[in-house]
Image (cartoon, grey):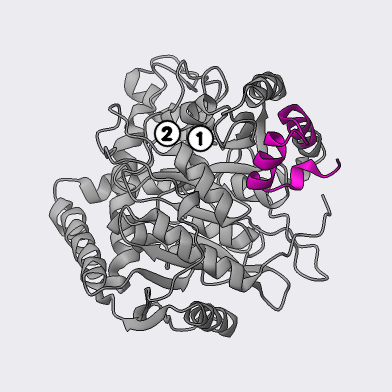
Amino acid sequence: MSDLNKLTLADARDKMRAGEVTSVELTEACLSEIEGASALGAFVHNTPEIALEQAKAADVRIQAGNAPDMCGIPLGIKDLFCTKGVASQAASAILEGFKPEYESTVTQNLWDAGSVMLGKLNMDEFAMGSSNETSTYGNAVNPWRRTGDDTALTPGGSSGGSASAVAADLCLAATGTDTGGSIRQPAAFTGITGIKPTYGRVSRWGVVAFASSLDQAGPMTKTVRDSAIMLETMCSHDAKDSTSVDFAVPNFEAALTGDIRGKKIGIPKEYHMDGMPAEIEKLWADGTAMLKDAGAEIVDISLPHTKYALPAYYVIAPAEASSNLARYDGVRYGHRASLGKGDGITEMYEKTRAEGFGPEVQRRVMIGTYVLSAGFYDAYYNRARRVRTLIKKDFEDVFAAGVDAILTPATPSSAFGLGEMKDADPVKMYLNDVFTVTVNLAGLPGITVPTGLDAQGLPLGLQLIGRPWEEGDLLNSAYVLEQAAGFASKPAKWW
């Protein structure tokens, strides 16, 4: 059977159980596709030997019967997840040569279920970026192109390699992380599905930290069903992560009933931004109509503190980053600068960080250190934390009024060209996260579903935001939207 790499995760699972295909065949199809796709810059550390070994073991489990759903599924792993004995660099020069002696909880859960690791995926350095242009490995490239135009486009960030790999069928699914939209924005830019679970649903242990109170891992997949299957395996209570919640993990796939009659879907007036492209407005209106036709009740809602979300995020996230990144000092692991005569430990720290961190990471560390400094702590950091509480309360009030999910655009535009925002004011780049950061600040689950193409032939996505811990319900609403939109476009192969 050809094109095995193009199967959805659910189809591959079912075909393996039926004996129509083996994990080894699936894995070999993906490995050969990866080999010919270097132009995408998606995979940065390939692990074919590990993959084939895991695939053989998975086939034995499947033949024995009763194998878990994720058994035998070939995956790409974002370079932010520590994988034992395999380079885990967070796309930063400062972690060059770092091979962890331990496995992140998320990847351990996947390997325990029999999944297969094809390799590590490109990303923005330390997950800081919205375009995958800050990576030490170079840019990841979107497999989509504008109609009649060869301009290389961004796959979004920071999980750009994951989005590109899934959209180009290099793997059946991938792990991503989301601190301010880093799963949902790239998913929208590449025409795939991405879910950020409730904060605390998935363990952060062994995931290189950016902003600890915001980071959350999730799956990036070809369909909503695939996201439901993979998310269930990624979730678990973990004593090694103090923010991990000890809740039972439901069968998310079983929640996909396709019935949302009587559900209340909120449309927030604050997300109608000035200058929003007409195509995004129309997509949002069409998505609203689809959910209404499926029997949902559409209600207008207000989230009044939305306008403060971006500034609050860009105080809190850099503050936490400056604290988290202080450990990269050239002493124990990773890059260490060569020192001149008379250089002491201070010079060693300074030179190592200047060489090891890229400009965007340096910018955010400096902002974070500034807002945490003695004279500005209350003026910036504490004020941002108070704003965050108000943003969270906005959502709580809406959910208390009976709203089940909130529908918004996922991004303010379709994918832009690589380099197009490079020399612009960094704030312009930060505006890419305008619809997604509120979800991280409030710790809520959010999912992006591809729902249409723009006039240039590029994918556009809509976002659904759910109640905390109700990912099953959220996935079901997303499933209804996915079925109604019927998005089946794929990028034309040029790589």
Q: Does the magenta stretch include residue 3?
A: yes
For the residues labelled 1 and 2, the Cα–Cα distance comes to 7 Å
Between residue 33 and residue 238, name the one nearer to us.
238
Which quarter of the picture shows residue 397?
bottom left
The reply to whether discs 1 and 2 touch (Cβ–Cβ < 8 Å) is yes
Q: Is the stretch drawn in magenta largely helix, strand or loop?
A: helix
The number of callouts visible is 2
Q: In this view, does 423 lie to the left or right of 52?
A: left
At x 49%, y 77%, the residue is 291
Q: Is residue 140 visible?
A: no
Between residue 317 and residue 218, name the one nearer to us.
218
The mark that comes first in sequence, 1 or 2, is 1
Q: Quadrant of the N terminus?
A: top right
Give the residue pinned by disc 2: 208
Q: Is residue 82 left or right of residue 305?
A: right
Which quarter of the picture shows residue 64?
top right
At x 30%, y 26%, the residue is 240
Give the residue pinned by disc 1: 90
Specify start and end residues of the magenta stretch as a single range: 1-29
Q: Quick one: SS at disc 2?
A: loop
Between residue 244 and residue 179, name the one nearer to us.
244
Q: Quick one: SS at disc 1?
A: loop
